[in-house]
Image: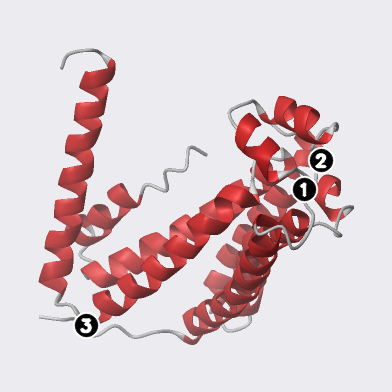
Amino acid sequence: MDQQVEIEPMARVFSGTMQLMTWIGLTILVVFGLLYITGLMPGNVELEDCINHWGKPTSDFWQTTAGRKANGYKWFLMHLNTGDSWSLVGVALLAFSPVVSLLLASFKAPRIFKLILFVLCLELIFAVIRPFIIGNN
Amino acid sequence: MFGVGAGWASVPVLNLIMGVPIKVAAATSMGIITVNGAAATWIYLANGAILPFIVVPSVIGVTIGARIGARVAHRAKPVYAKYLVLGVMLFAGAMNIYKGCSNLKLF
């Protein structure tokens, strides 16, 4: 027998925000990714180079294909004239969507959940800035 | 960090041990994976380890599959969802055992 489940306002806000941000992120990721793959937009890395070198460690891959290192977020944020960089902006937006969703959901949350959501937000924000604090590994 | 969200473990734990309905368990597990995956993504992004060339086709397939799965799960009887989860887990387990044995050259 199917059980009835009550959906709290907090969960509705969380899921609604996640859905909206996911669609925006996915659209950016897929549209610019397809423009890059079809050759309508240039990329940081040529597709042929990408296929030939994707088995390499990331540092070697970027050194061989683009002649530079990929470190932090500047390597794609400073090259927004390329399709693959915009695709990665879509990925970043997707990865950031739980932070925004949890923050908005916290306004509808009971007091005890506010604390949990706050801790979760801190954890996710730490994940964003972690590469600058303790390196990439 | 290995791309394993442990959905294979959290769904049975939520459903069989904690008594959460199977569809709610699957959705809750997805929520846990989403938040954990989002946190892990930044390390890969900062290392240049995400290639749109691979991500875009994967995302298209996963998005279509996830939407179909969510619609089917909404209409399907919970008992079928439970058997499907069990079947997929059994299949995945058998495949992992087979791969492990193959790597050890036991087959």
Q: Is residue B46 left or right of residue A123?
A: right
In the picture of the structure, the residue carrying the numbered disc 3 is B75
Q: How is the image coloured?
A: secondary structure
How far apart are labels 1 and 3 at the CA level?
42 Å
Q: Residue at x 85, y 33 (%)?
A: A68
Question: Based on the displayed image, in which of its 4 quarters is residue A8 positioned?
Answer: bottom left
Query: The numbered mark 3 sits on a residue in which chain?
Result: B
In the picture of the structure, the residue carrying the numbered disc 2 is A132
Q: Secondary structure at mark 2?
A: helix
Q: Tell me if residue B38 comes above or below residue A113 in the rendering.
A: above
Q: Nearer the viewer, residue B19 or A14?
A: A14
Residue A96 visible (yes or no): no
Q: Are marks 1 and 2 on the same chain?
A: yes
How far apart are labels 3 and 2 at the CA level?
46 Å
Mark 1 or 3, which is nearer the eye?
3
Residue A44 point in image, percent of width and height: 79, 46
Disc 3 crowd rating (10 Å Cα; few below 14, some 14-19, many 20+) is: few
In the picture of the structure, the residue carrying the numbered disc 1 is A129
Residue lying furthest top in this view?
B105
Which kind of residue does numbered mark 1 sit on? Ile
Tags 1 and 2 in contact by the CB under 8 Å rule?
yes
Q: Are marks 1 and 3 on the same chain?
A: no
How far apart are labels 1 and 2 at the CA level?
6 Å
Residue lying furthest right in this view?
A78
Disc 2 crowd rating (10 Å Cα; few below 14, some 14-19, many 20+) is: some
Tags 3 and 2 in contact by the CB under 8 Å rule?
no
Q: Secondary structure at mark 3?
A: helix
Q: Residue at x 85, y 31 (%)?
A: A67
Number of numbered tags placed on the structure image: 3
Residue B103 point in image, percent of width and height: 28, 18
